[in-house]
Amino acid sequence: MSREIIHTRLRRYPVILRRAIRKLVVTDAGIEAFKPPPPVIPDPLPPLSELPQRDALLAAITQVDYLAANPDLPGVIKSDEDARAHFDAKGFHQNRRWKPGLLDYFDTKYYRRRYSRLPLSSAAAAERHYALVGIFEGRFPNLATEHMWNARIHLFQMGKVGSKAIEAGIAVASGESCIHVHWADFWEQQRPHIRIPYSQLLAHPRKQPVLVLTGVRDPFSRLVSGWFQEFESRKRDRSLMTWEQAKKEISARFHSDALRIVNWFEHRFYCELDVYAQPFDTTAGYVTLEHPWMLVFVYRQDALPRLIEPLREFLGMPNFNLEPSNISNQKWYADVYRQTFEQFRLPEDAVKACLATQYMQHFFTEAERADMANRWID
């Protein structure tokens, strides 16, 4: 059957069927069954025993991850040690994944272009290299991760301390985007496409220190304000937005939530930078901390409106201004918000325990702490 006759007859079939038939190989002898091309074999890596990353790779493998990535091995893998032994002996050569989702958001075109000196002759070779070598060398899996790595400004703070106003002000003054993080333990959940932990993104050697802004606020007003923010962000039933509900839930959570606030600086910015090692200027309302990898501007939320000039100097943005944003007493729940701030009180022991923490004694004067005791004790 000639090619001309075949193509003429194809016109009688619907478009979808024609497309399917054209995937067959047409020759002068007729139509032969289409044979798929041979699979692309990834560029070979050295044996696992010769990889410098071998120890780090095996240490990262867990039973849970390995079984999730390889569900055909439930009877073989019964511990972390089994998973590592299997990958060491067989999994590496079988090109098995050692963790599920390892290549989610992996951009093969970006990776081959970004690391053009590597012998990555195919997309499969790029995937294999990243999963087994590149991830342990700190290579970027996509452009977004590289941008995050090189960001000049980080807003790393607990939330409800004016960070939205600062972020908006930076955008207006320079058009520059910055990394905005409240709780680093939610980093991977909130930004799954960024395949590097926030601790590494923040704390690593740079030609110029990264600029970090972090705010503090007394735990009492911070937790009241935070409850309303959380209520809104979780899109809860608005009928539950009452003074009684706010009092009940804030009181029940105060101890655990206050501990998170007063212990917020335990991360030490992931480079052993101790915020308590340098006195805080309560009159100025801010202090600047220096580290070879970063400069940290620590400010009090209540002082923020009068810190325009210090912020301009710190950011190197002479046109910077605060752009008020996310103001609780201007939202739909403003009446309940005001009532809660006016009427909410806490047990004396809870307030005094909070006031005695290193956080409170470092950032607030004795007179300010006494005022808070009068204000919040039931």
Image (spheres, rainbow, N blue to C red):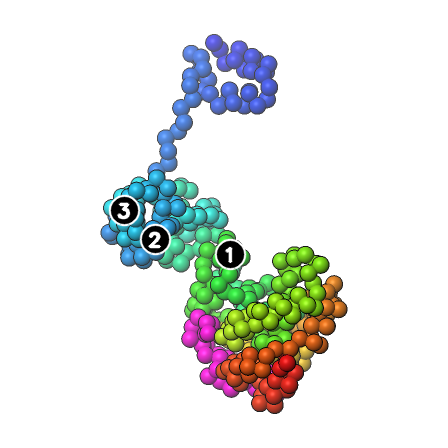
The answer to whether 118 is drawn above or below residue 275 in the figure is above
Residue 76 point in image, percent of width and height: 28, 43
Taking the spot 46% from the left edge, 55% from the top edge, the residue there is: 195
Q: CA distance from mark 1 to mark 3?
A: 29 Å
Residue 180 point in image, percent of width and height: 57, 65
Residue 11 point in image, percent of width and height: 59, 16
Instruction: Give residue 74's quadrant in the image.
Output: top left
Q: Amino acid at mark 2?
A: Thr
Residue at mark 2: 62
Which disc, if any, is residue 86?
3
The magenta region covers: 266-291
Q: CA distance from mark 3 to mark 2?
A: 11 Å
Residue 42 point in image, percent of width and height: 35, 41
| Circle 2 SS class | loop
Residue at mark 1: 189
Q: Earlier in the sequence, mark 2 or mark 1?
A: 2
Q: CA distance from mark 2 to mark 1?
A: 20 Å
Q: Amino acid at mark 3?
A: His
Residue 208 in view (yes/no):
yes
Q: Is residue 53 left or right of residue 346?
A: left
| Circle 3 SS class | helix
Q: Earlier in the sequence, mark 3 or mark 2?
A: 2
Q: Earlier in the sequence, mark 1 or mark 3?
A: 3
| Circle 1 SS class | helix
Q: Which quadrant is home to the C terminus?
A: bottom right
